[in-house]
Image: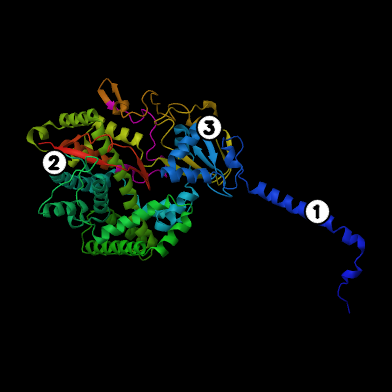
Amino acid sequence: MDSAPDFLSTPLTAVQNTPVLAGCLAVAAGSALYFGYAWALPTPIPGIPYDKSASRSLLGSLPELSAYIKKHGRLRPWLVGHSKRHGSVLTQFWMGPFAKPTLILADFQESRDILLRRSKEFDRSSRSISIFSGPIGHHHIAMRSSDPRFKSNKELVRDLMTPAFLHQVTAPQIYDKAQQLIDLWTRKADLTEGCPFDVKQDVVDLALDIINAAAFGLGDDMSITKQQLVFLDSLSRFQHTINADGSVTIPREPHVPDIAAIYEFGHHVGTQFKAISPTWAHPCKVLTSPTLAKAIARKNELIRREVEKTLERIRSGDNAMWSAMDNIILREMASAEKAGRKPDFHSPQIYDELFGFIVAGHDTSASSICWMVKWLGVNQAAQAKVRQVLHEAFPQHRSEGGQPSVAELTKTTLPYLDAFVQECLRLDAPVPLTQREAIVDTEILGYKIPKGTEIFMLSSGPGFQLPEIPVADDLRRSASRGPDHHPYGQWDHDGMDDFRPERWMKTNEKGEYFDQYAGPMMAFGFGPRGCFGRRLALLETRIVVALLVWNFEFHSVGKDLESREIADAITTSPVYCYARVSKID
């Protein structure tokens, strides 16, 4: 039987060597820690500029990012500043510990080439997918193009942004709801007696009224704008008090529960953009916020109820196309019949595509119109020119005291109106960056880009409102060079940040025309994964701005309220959006 070790009989030399052994262990442990620390440090992609301090920190760029966001409440300007201080169109940073480098691309031509022609190399980024995968995970915006579900989802909604659907179904709703806003602001102008009033929520409500009507065919009983007008008319007396900034606060009626639920859920989607880990942020918020959980349940019940109404109408023989819901339901019927299966009208796919249509159509339009309302008041000359162009295009309506119809506004060529809209979008893009991820090992401007690298492509800053950062043409792919592949011009460096719609106007033998290729503008992205609501936003802004300028004169609201301070969520919108209007008879 083996006996226990006898330490008293251990050789003296072994005892004497114990300090040596301890020293060896300490060296080994120190080496392991050193190499572990070195391994954990950020590893840059060779050749691409980066902050040396970030590369020496286990947290990467996170401390600087966090400090900037805490101070300014925004991330996106930091990205522009990163490109400027390195003087390079391609830079890299690290969003946290153990993170791969994220690239910032500040070059319009290269970004457009990637988005338009390189979809087999770059797809939606993992982060952008994680932002939407919790709230609307069955919407195509939360899918890679290679996802088996993506094609069938796109098939469901493919008609919703076609010219036919937009002009026949959506445009009349835009026109009708814009008229309700005109009625509301006419009443508010009377109540405020020439003082500025906050119109941001009015514009946000208008955009939601429009998209709800386009999505579900909701009537005036669900119109937020109409509800606010009825509320103001019901006030027996209103004595306004002028605030320190010169504005007047007008009371509002609370939103009805269904609308409040849509706003609550939409706000939650916006918070996902600021979350460090959107994948975990969504379920944690749902579990800890009874308000959000109730909003999700109410939102789903609203969709279920509207689906059943649509089915009842279609089954009764009414196949007229009144809304996106009608289109999607009819497509599901056709798809199920073709596949020999039973249609599923209450699938997560249909619910998320419908609500995604609301999100896509609401936020871009609301933020764009807010900026345009601000610019109408700030730039009186541009406002007057838009009104002059409208009066010249529709002289009969002007002389008879009417206004142009929805068909006239959508079909008539109005170059300066288009230039005004585009200039607003150039200076204040609703989507100031586009995210993509390399899905294969590839190259950008001669640099080797590993698979899995995320890229932030800027649509503000250099080339847009600031002088572009030079790039040698031979670094670009041949497919992106030359006027046939890149027809855009460049903006004059003098006054790039000025509001000047005339920069979009050109002249030929037929007179002035709007040149969409006058210079860089990437408010909605490009290519097959560009902004789904782009056409809707452009149609909506055109009709709404035309009707507002036709009916109101926008006066200056004062320097404080003209602030261009920005709030970031799903889109970028002005923190302050005030108007001081007088009705044009």
Are the residues tagged 1 and 2 within 8 Å (C-beta)?
no
Q: In terms of sequence position, does the residue under pointer 1 or pointer 2 come before the other? A: 1
Tell me if residue 288 comes above or below residue 143 in the rendering. Answer: below
Decide whether residue 524 is among the magenta residues. yes
Q: Is mark 2 on a helix, strand or loop?
A: loop
In the picture, measured across the screen, residue 140 lies left or right of residue 577, that is right
> What residue is pinned by disc 1?
24
Q: Is residue 343 visible?
A: no
Task: Check disc 2 and give the amino acid type.
Answer: Glu
- Amino acid type of disc 3? His
Query: Residue tagged by mark 3?
Result: 86
Q: How far apart are marks 3 and 1 (CA)?
A: 45 Å
First in residue order: circle 3 vs circle 2: 3
Q: Quadrant of residue 333?
A: bottom left
Q: What stretch is highlighted in magenta?
A: 513-537
Residue sitting at 90 percent across and 66 percent down? 10
Tell me: residue 363, above or below residue 512.
Answer: below
Task: Give the structural element (helix, strand or loop) at label 1.
Answer: helix
Give left or right: position of 505 versus 80: left
The residue that mark 2 highlights is 193
